[in-house]
Image: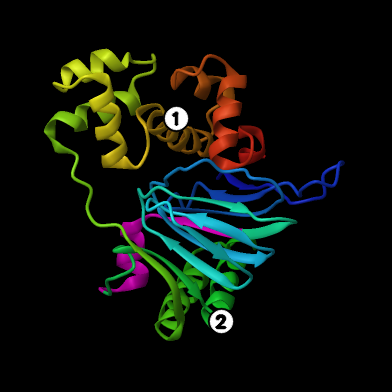
């Protein structure tokens, strides 16, 4: 069994506390984190899982694909469907938050029970009781559970409680149309270890490089290079959770070296690969 929790503690310089991650090989359908930040730390990125964010202390600004900044404060809950671009960074002072990442199909089967609407938009709630139950659910994970029964019950209760919570912001996500010509380009960007030439990808898609850049940005919310780095970080996280050494992950995903992986990973996860698996 691989059960990883990296504890938050004060850093020597007092700037931030180290992030605290939870992932367990018995429950590959979910992971979680608790973090404290002071400086801007996240580039626009996506998750392959449904994200539930909780604001514990401080204030931050959330930006989705629309580009409109949304202020977040203590007690807010943010729901982000899988695959949708966003970033969230502190305004000033310490910003303490939690985020659970859960496979959408597992949520549909075990938590939502046929209810719809949670995947149709990025939503920000001033959640009250619901936020406290989400917090209890995340605490149940960090308590090293033998199973997911308590977590599942609490998560159902939290989503039920959202029915009476006030929606502060909603941003429709909709289905992204990639088209037959663009989908292979995105697969190459995500999966090819060697850096592809944009001119070659554009020619294969029947475009010039500038048309390709605009098309990828329209389809994904990210430029081709940003999409490539985001996809590689998602794969890196899965490989690290599976026990792959950092050096092997860097090599397999086409990073120049461990330092290159470290820089890109930190820009997307706000932690190093070593902190992620500690």
Q: Residue furthest bottom?
A: 164
Q: Quadrant of residue 81?
A: bottom left
**How many angstroms separate mark 2 from mark 1 (CA)?**
36 Å
Label 1 environment density (alpha carbons within 10 Å; few <14, some 14–19, many ≥20): many
**Relative to the observer, which residue lies in front, 207 or 151?**
207
Q: Is residue 99 on the magenta stretch?
A: yes
Above or below for 82 versus 199: below
Question: For mark 2, what is the residue?
Answer: 128
Image position, residue 46 (x, y; %):
42, 45
In the image, which residues are magenta?
98-114
Q: Residue at x 25, y 73 (%)?
A: 114
Direction from residue 242 to residue 89 in the image, left or right:
right
> What residue sits 16% from the left and 23% below the top?
205
Near-viewer residue (62 or 99): 62
- The residue identified by callout 1 is 229
* Residue 85 circle label: none
- Could you tell me if residue 144 is visible in this image? no
- Which residue shows up at 38% across the image and 50% down it? 65
Q: Are discs 2 and 1 less than 8 Å apart at CB?
A: no
């Amino acid at each position: 069994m691989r059960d990883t929790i990296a504890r938050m503690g004060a850093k020597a310089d007092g700037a931030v506390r180290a992030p605290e991650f939870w992932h367990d090989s018995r429950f590959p359908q979910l992971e979680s984190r608790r973090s404290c930040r002071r400086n801007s730390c996240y580039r626009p990125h996506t998750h392959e899982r449904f994200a539930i964010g909780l604001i514990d202390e401080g204030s931050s600004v959330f930006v989705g694909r629309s580009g409109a900044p949304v202020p977040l404060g203590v007690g807010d809950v943010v729901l982000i469907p899988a695959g949708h671009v966003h970033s969230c960074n502190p305004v000033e002072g310490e910003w303490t938050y939690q985020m659970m990442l859960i496979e959408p199909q597992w949520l549909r089967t075990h938590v939502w029970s046929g209810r719809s609407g949670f995947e149709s938009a990025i939503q920000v709630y001033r959640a009250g009781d619901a936020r406290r139950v989400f917090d209890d659910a995340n605490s149940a994970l960090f308590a090293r559970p033998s199973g997911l029964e308590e977590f599942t019950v609490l998560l159902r209760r939290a989503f039920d409680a959202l029915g009476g919570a006030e929606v502060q912001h909603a941003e429709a996500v909709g289905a992204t149309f990639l088209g037959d010509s663009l989908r292979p380009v995105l697969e190459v960007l995500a999966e090819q270890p060697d850096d592809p030439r944009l001119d070659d990808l554009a020619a294969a898609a029947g475009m010039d490089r500038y048309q390709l850049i605009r098309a990828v940005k329209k389809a994904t919310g990210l430029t081709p290079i940003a999409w490539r780095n985001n996809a590689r970080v998602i794969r890196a996280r899965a490989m690290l959770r599976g026990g792959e050494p950092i050096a092997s992950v860097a090599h397999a995903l086409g990073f120049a070296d461990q330092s290159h992986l470290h820089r890109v990973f930190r820009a997307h996860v706000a932690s190093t690969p070593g902190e992620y698996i500690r």
